[in-house]
Image (cartoon, rainbow, N blue to C red):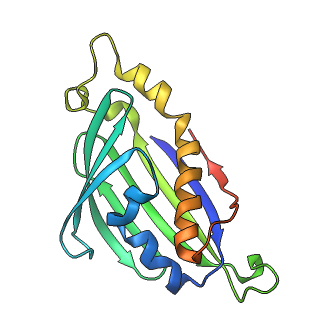
Amino acid sequence: MDRILLSTVAHRPPEDVFPYVRSFADYPRYTEHLEEVRVHGNGDVGSVYDLRVAWWKLSYTARSKVTAIDAPESLEWHLLNDVDARGTWRVEPEPEAAPDGVETASRIYFEAVYDPYSADESALSLPRFVSLDWVVRKVEPRIVDEAETVVQRLVADIEGERRDVELTVHEMP
């Protein structure tokens, strides 16, 4: 299993940050590769999200289920189809990270644990002569770039304005 653990700071308290990380339906605004999110449920534990992703000549709909919520601290999820993957969003108070003039801050963590080789190749509709191994080698380096874009846009929504944010990579495959 591979693991990704990333974090950044938002200049708001956890109770202001958590609704943004919980709102999967808004995620297409944060990334160019997530085309659509369909929600099945009310956003609580047991809700399922169909996440339509497209990159290069590939498109795929991941089905994700919320397995636990402890607001405003954490949300856990796992994929229901084709790939063995699960993860967590965590929000922790980090008031010492607040700059002068800002009351408080929170650290937002994103963690994903996955087996890239557990993917069902037939579900990905790979082009002829393209192997799953090739796709994995091409996609994994792009994850950090994509994460930086998502984090910057997420923090801009949370704080109401765009700023440079620092993405801390704690662990990557």
Query: In the rendering, at what x and y percent does residue 6 appear?
Result: 59, 55
Question: At 51% across and 84% down in the image, what residue appears?
Answer: 16
Position of 81 relative to 66 (above/below)? above
Query: In the rendering, at what x and y percent does residue 147 appear?
Result: 54, 50
Q: Quadrant of residue 22?
A: bottom left
Closer to the camera in the image, 41 or 66:
41
Q: Is residue 27 left or right of residue 45?
A: right
Closer to the camera in the image, 164 or 124:
164
Q: Is residue 148 left or right of residue 23?
A: right
Query: In the rendering, at what x and y percent does residue 157 appear?
Result: 52, 71
Question: At 77% across and 80% down in the image, what residue appears?
Answer: 96
* Number of dots carrying numbers: 0
Q: Which quadrant of the figure contains the N terminus? A: top left
Query: In the rendering, at what x and y percent does residue 84 appear?
Result: 32, 43
Question: At 26% across and 76% down in the image, what residue appears?
Answer: 44
Q: Which quadrant of the figure contains the C terminus? A: top right
Residue extending farthest bottom: 103
Question: At 63% across and 66% down in the image, what residue appears?
Answer: 162
Q: Quadrant of residue 115?
A: top left
Residue extending farthest right: 100
Closer to the camera in the image, 50 or 132:
50
